[in-house]
Image (cartoon, rainbow, N blue to C red):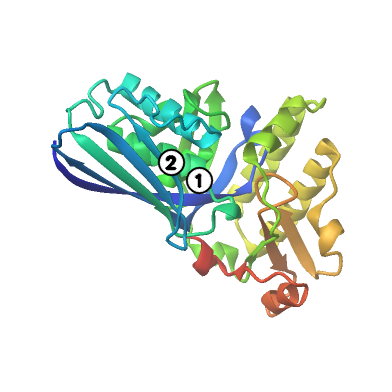
Amino acid sequence: MAGSLHFRANGKLMLFGEYAVLNGCTAIAWPTRFGQNLQVHSEKLLVNGLYWKSIDHKGEVWFEAYFDEEFNLLHELQNEVALTLQKILLKARSLNPEFLKDGNYHSAEIEADYPREWGLGSSSTLIYLIAKWAEVDPMKLFFSTLSGSGYDVACAGSETPIAYQKTGLHQATWKALNWDLSVLDSACFVYLGTKQSSREGILYYVNKGLDKQEMAESLNALVEDYLLYPSREKLLESMDDSEELLSQSLMMDKVKDLYFSDFPGSVKSLGAWGGDFVMALANDPEFDAKSYFIQKGYEIVLAPKEMLL
């Protein structure tokens, strides 16, 4: 059918449960104010198929591809981005055989409102947006095309923080948390400027010779305890305990030890360790954490109300 449609997907941050979420640990995740928008337009022309364009936060095109009606790539564009997009489109059609089979010419423009290197979930928002366009289940589309826990896809369509648990190979449950940003009072989110690949982080964890189930159970107990008592004091304690547990299990240095040993409070990695964002919370709520990190040379320091929904 000719016409235009618009879809929106939120980015995400996992506050607790990184890595262990793959083995059934409950994860606490929060959708971000940043995300991606998909604008699609369909019309009757002498040609059919799909023209896809990806635009960054500066309004510049960083990727484009052309597909015929069977989603064959045209113009011999065979890079990884194009092939991943093709895989998602083909799977979406397998879930809904009528998807883009109307004989029309389609154009799709996806635009992020944040720098892609921030690591807020460009793949998960892409999955979610195509699923909504194709009128299929976003989680089914995710589990049949990409690896990971799927928590980020759940966040893409959520307006609240969630407690998320993977319950099977291609199954998960989650619930909305009735929290507002006051539970993160005076915390801040700092971009380290070292882009981490979620895929590589997952592979590192999967191939690591450790008792993943034991680690997941230990971290899950910590998360469940915090869910019962989401106070500022408990958040400080849980951040430190999570970092210690994962540092010992993964045999990786804690981010505070590496970069912020003199910070008077807790600093916690978010997502794949070693890059993207960290969450920091000072022991004293009056401490000017933003100035501390800026003086260290970190330019992107965001308060919860600037980062999260």
Q: Amino acid at mark 1?
A: Ser
Is 224 rendered above or below residue 78? below
Secondary structure of the residue carrying tag 2 is helix
211 to the left or right of 19:
right
* Residue 19 location (% of width, % of height): 68, 37
Say whether residue 186 is left or right of residue 253: left
Which numbered disc covers residue 169? none
Evaluate whether residue 59 shows in this view: yes
Distance from disc 1 to disc 2, alpha carbons, whole Å, reads 6 Å
Nearer to us in this view, 298 or 287: 298
Against 167, is 155 above or below? below
49 or 1, which is in the foreground?
49
Quarter of the image with the N terminus in it: top left
Q: Which residue shows up at 55% across the image and 33% down it?
A: 80
Residue 93 placement: quadrant: top left
Residue type beneath disc 2: Leu
Do the numbered discs 1 and 2 sit on residues whose CB atoms are within 8 Å? Answer: yes
Task: Report the number of numbered marks.
Answer: 2
Relative side of 201 to 160, left or right: right
Badge 1 crowding class, 10 Å Cα cut-off, few under 14, some 14 to 19, many 20 or more, is many
Mark 2 closeness class: few <14, some 14–19, many ≥20 residues within 10 Å = many
- How far across and how far down the image is residue 291, in percent? 70, 79
Quadrant of the image containing the C terminus: bottom left
Question: Which residue is drawn at the image coordinates 65% and 28% (left, top)?
Answer: 23
What residue is shown at x 36% (from left), y 41% (from top)?
A: 52
Residue at the location (45% across, 29% down)? 76
- Residue 150 location, x and y as percent? 51, 34
Question: Label 2 belongs to which residue?
Answer: 126
Residue 122 image label: 1
Whole-percent x, y for residue 197 in the image: 65, 42
